[in-house]
Amino acid sequence: MKKAVMLINDTTYAFNLRGAIIEKLVQEGFEVVIVGQLLKHQDELKKMGAKLIGVETGRHGTNPLSDLKLMQTYKKILKAEKPDVVLTYNIKPNVYGGMACQQLKIPYLPNVTGLGTPVENPGKLQKLTIQLYKMGVAGGACVFFQNNDNRDFFEQHHMLKANARTRVLPGSGVDLAKHPVLPWSEDGKVHFLFAARVMKEKGIDLFLAAARKFANENTIFDVCGACDDENYKSILNSEKCVVCHGEQKDMTPFYSECSCFLYPSYYPEGMSNVLLEAAASGRPVIAADRAGCRETLDDGLTGFLVPVNDEKAVIEAVEKFLQMRSEERKAMGLRGSEKIRREFDRKLVVEAYWEEIQRVLGD
């Protein structure tokens, strides 16, 4: 039996975004081992046939000794498991898992799920992070990217080997069975929805600016998500113009009630999953014109693009949406759903992975 090891931040990410790949590998007769922090969905992953090994990646840590220890942990696990192929995701598994795979001469497929703030902002930390990425990712049998801008960045900074094999995926894709087109709420109100980890870079301040200007009894601004930045707990609690729902397991009721998904994020992500899910549900979106967001919509047809971190532009886009007739909003949402179904089906991601795994293994 062939074996695939998945190096990943945690089990929540593995189940929510990589479950379809795990299912495909198990279906094809692979033993699948998931290495990451043991959080939610452990039982579901085991039922799918995966073996779990708990490892704390310290995703936000910057201690070089801890990172070196993580690489040694990966090496020890990979030596014991003897996989035929390794799939790596997220920054530290990509970097230190990639280094471990190179040292052990195990073929691996890294997925650059976003560059991260240290890479995007020039300075000493950027130089260090670029070097680490180069050491960990460049040896991949195929390097997956989630948008063209990220791949261009790697090429411009010489972070890939000459003639390196790369592929751009449609993000993590959307499970279309879980995100069908939802019926519209007929309560006569317009709901703008923000769903993400609540932090400045995700555009929460821009969302709040629009809420302060337009919120009334018929125009509701809903916020879903835990506060990554603790300062926003008191800010959101004091704002009467927004309705805060906290972190949600199931977003379907909120997508259903939503009239427009307002997400002016300028966070350096690979591809915004919440934008894909909202659009798949048949909802127009307003998003920032940056990599990982702009790809999810066609400006003026399925939603509106706004310049990055531009409060005035966000307010103008919200005003434009409010001036539309209900039928126009619904038509915009349906066009968005058709785009997602055509370009971002998760099956496309699974197919790309399976092709590369077969190529690596010579099948």
Image (cartoon, helix red, strand yellow):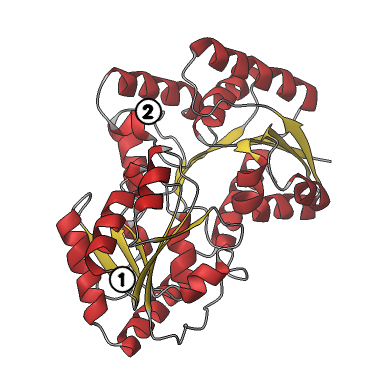
Residue under the point 76% across and 27% down? 82
In the picture, the quarter occupied by the N terminus is top right
> Which residue in the protein does label 1 denote?
303
Residue 186 location (% of width, % of height): 45, 87
Question: Residue extending furthest left?
Answer: 312
Q: Is residue 49 left or right of 299 when viewed as pictured?
A: right
Amino acid type, label 2: Met
Taking the image as drawn, is residue 190 in sight?
A: yes
> Which residue in the protein does label 2 denote?
159
Q: Secondary structure at mark 2?
A: loop
Taking the image as drawn, is residue 139 in sight?
A: no
In the rendered view, would you say 217 is above or below 316? below
Is label 2 or label 1 in front? 1
In the rendered view, would you say 253 is above or below 8? below
- What is the quadrant of residue 14 in the picture? top right
Q: Secondary structure at mark 1?
A: strand
Residue under the point 75% across and 48% down? 45
Question: Residue extending furthest top?
Answer: 65
Residue under the point 44% across and 35% down? 164
Residue 153 location (% of width, % of height): 31, 37
Q: Is residue 252 left or right of 279 when viewed as pictured?
A: right
- Foreground residue among 188 and 165: 188
